[in-house]
Image: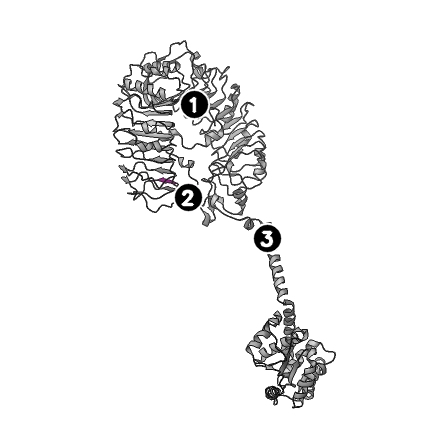
Amino acid sequence: MSPRGTSLVLLVVTLLTPDCVAAGMDGNQFDMCVTSRRRVADLSNQNLTSFPLHLPNTTEYLDISHNSIQSITTQVFPRLPLLCFLKATHCGLRDISPKVFQHTPALQVLDISSNKLTIIPDISLPRLTILDLADNLYQGYQLPECFQNLTNLQVLSLGSKAAPSVNLNDFKPVMNIPLQHLVLGAGVPWQMYESGALGMLSLQKVSLFTNFCGRFSVFDNLLVDLNVTRASALRFVTVFSDDCNVTDDPFQILKAMPHVRTLTIENTWLNSSFMEKFLKNVWLSSIEDLTFVNITYNEDTPDGFQFHPLNHSISLRSVTFDTVIHYQYRYPTVNISFKYASNLNYVRFSRSGMNILPCKLLSVLPTLETLDVSDNLLSDLGFWWPSCSYTSVFPKLKHLLLSKNRFRSLSFISGRTHEMKHLESLDLSFNSIYLKKRCKWPAHLIELNLGNNNLGNSIFKHLSPNFQRIYLSKTGITAITQEDMSRFPKLTHLKLSANSIQVLPELLDAPNLISLYVDQNAITSLSRHVFGGFPKLQLLKAGNNPFICSCDLHWFLTDFNKSLLLIWPLDYLCSTPKQFKGLPLSEYKTSVISCEIWLQTTVGFSVLLLVATTFGLVFYKLDGVWYTKMLWVWIRVKRRGKKRSHLVKNMSFSYHAFISYSHQDANFVSSELVPSLENAGFFLCVHERDFVPGDWIIDNIINCVESSYKTLFVLSKHFVQSEWCNYELFFAQHRAIDIQEDSLVFILLEPIPTDCLPKKYLRLRSLLQQQTYLEWPKDERKQQVFWASLKSMLRMADKSVVLRDMAVDLADTAILLSNQIRFNTLYD
């Protein structure tokens, strides 16, 4: 909730502020520069005696606090080019070598407070924005000259219990750097402050942690210089010790400091007599925001606090009392005219032990818009005290903060809010709220915070349809439905952090929703359709959920606008599967193809089509059709051969040779080759006379090749152009492989260059290169040698060659016998 009307975004995005430095820079300040939690190295309380040597060079945050590291040297300090946050507190550091940070150019935050440094180290880091050197042991506040290179420095914290004075030129190196916040002191009194030491600086806020008791002249000189700096915010921590007797008016100069708008007093003992003097100076000054933190109040005057009327306009708009202790058995007595509070619009009383609201003092403030009484002991009847009259209560109150008290009945509270005619927001977080009766909320109340109350899913039934901002963090909600959302048509901000919600339903519809918090739940995935119901969404916090890194999150990682996410990518980690546990979602990589089924189908079909097209083109270019046809015929031959192998197993060859030739070479075959061989007693198979009429040509070719001892190929340019010659060569080649002998004889009528052979004749090329062939000579003398060689090859089959008629009769007889056997078996 925003007590001063500050937007929700500014409240939740709390990174490192100047106040964090004075408090020791605790918390999650590394959010400001760290991009991944995997780049965070927390080595605090590890009993280290030196810097670790093997840190990843991607480390961005390093905490080595509470170890025993006495020095930092260039030899032991690791090279960390991406390091932006270094915290080394409570290590006993005594020495830091010059240029030790030369290999950490990205360093923005350096916290080496609470050590034993005897001198302020040389630090030259142009990107450094926050430097904390408080609580060390250097003898003075003299800054090294290299500090003039810290051009981006915004926050500087210095403090040493061994530094008793501030000299004129101590801060000269940073005089041209506009600091946002300067923190000085270590709680010990300053013996001397040389005028002008701080006057040369340009400051926005100054925090002084030192005791000025008995040295109010030093305090006066300091305030004069702070006025010169034009600082708008002053913060004094332990400005007076508990035993200090303040008789003077040390804050009298406040009236002459027109630039100061905010004043904070911390850790100080204050009595009623001092308060009268102090508030008089505040009333006459330009201060608008006055804060007391952790103070002890004592009434040293018999009538308590008495504030006498002043004829002066009042600038004060805000008063805060945070942690007030008083050692007396009655409530403090405060006597002040309401006209001095006529301009107050913000009042806070927290951690004061209040159990009854001083209704006559607070409830009648005419301009009060925000009342914060959180962290007290108030209950339902303690705040709405029965003895108080509430006929005209809180005439302009808009924001009421009742967090961390003892309120219980939501229905009772809802009824009493009708008395506050302008109330817009109510904070009831961290109470003991229970749901029993129906609630009746006023129409003007638009914001309710019920965080950290055990309420459950039924809480939505007890809320008003006029609510625009609902905060239900850690309230035991396990599910949210469209019925719940439909109750709040004006809803703009919804906070459901730290519950047990597992799923955000896809049908949720909140057309006006601007911000949604669902972090620290049990959500494993975020559906695209959920956010379709949030057209105006500007801020989403969904970190620290057990996300399942799978295709369900692919759209979220690739399509969702990450500028809408709060603390991205630090709080967004994979929980399962095991191999991705702890991996930031920003580093989880998955492809569209692996997650979209329709795209997988499209790409697969496209690739398959491309492969098929490529294969088809290659198949066509390499005469795959012809080879396929040959393969099919060869398969048929093999099957046919197996069926009839038992019939012809012991048969001899019918011919010495089958002659394969092109019809354009028929003259050579009929006039030279056939007469010469048949006259010598050889049986030849020639397709023109020996093919069986009516049979398929290929069957004739196969029968003749298988019935011949050799196959003579008459090679010429006409042969390689003949389709049927191709078939004859193909089957003869495979027969030669089957019977594992050389049954091919090549007769070369004319030279055939191998480059003129078609691609389908790759086998013929290799045969002509590896196998001896007979070349038909033109010289008649050489022809006699040709015939002798050819006849000698064919005579080797004389013992195996029989008359064709005998072979045919034998085959026919075998077929008849087979048919007779089947007939007898059928009719027996």
Spot occupied by residue 61 in the image (x, y as percentages of width and height): 38, 40
Magenta run includes residue 57:
yes
For marks 2 and 1, the one nearer the N-term is 2
Q: Which residue is mark 3?
A: 603
As measured in the structure, the alpha-carbon distance from the residue carrying label 3 to the one carrying label 1 is 65 Å
For marks 3 and 1, the one nearer the N-term is 1
The three-letter code of the residue at mark 3 reads Val
Looking at the rendered structure, the secondary structure element under dot 3 is: helix
Spot occupied by residue 592 in the image (x, y as percentages of width and height): 55, 48
Q: Which residue is mark 2?
A: 38
Q: Quadrant of residue 208?
A: top left
- Whether 359 is drawn above or below 827: the answer is above
Instruction: Report the side of 482 relative to 430 (left or right).
Output: right
Looking at the rendered structure, the secondary structure element under dot 1 is: loop
Instruction: Magenta stretch: give its range.
Output: 55-65
Q: Quadrant of residue 154?
A: top left
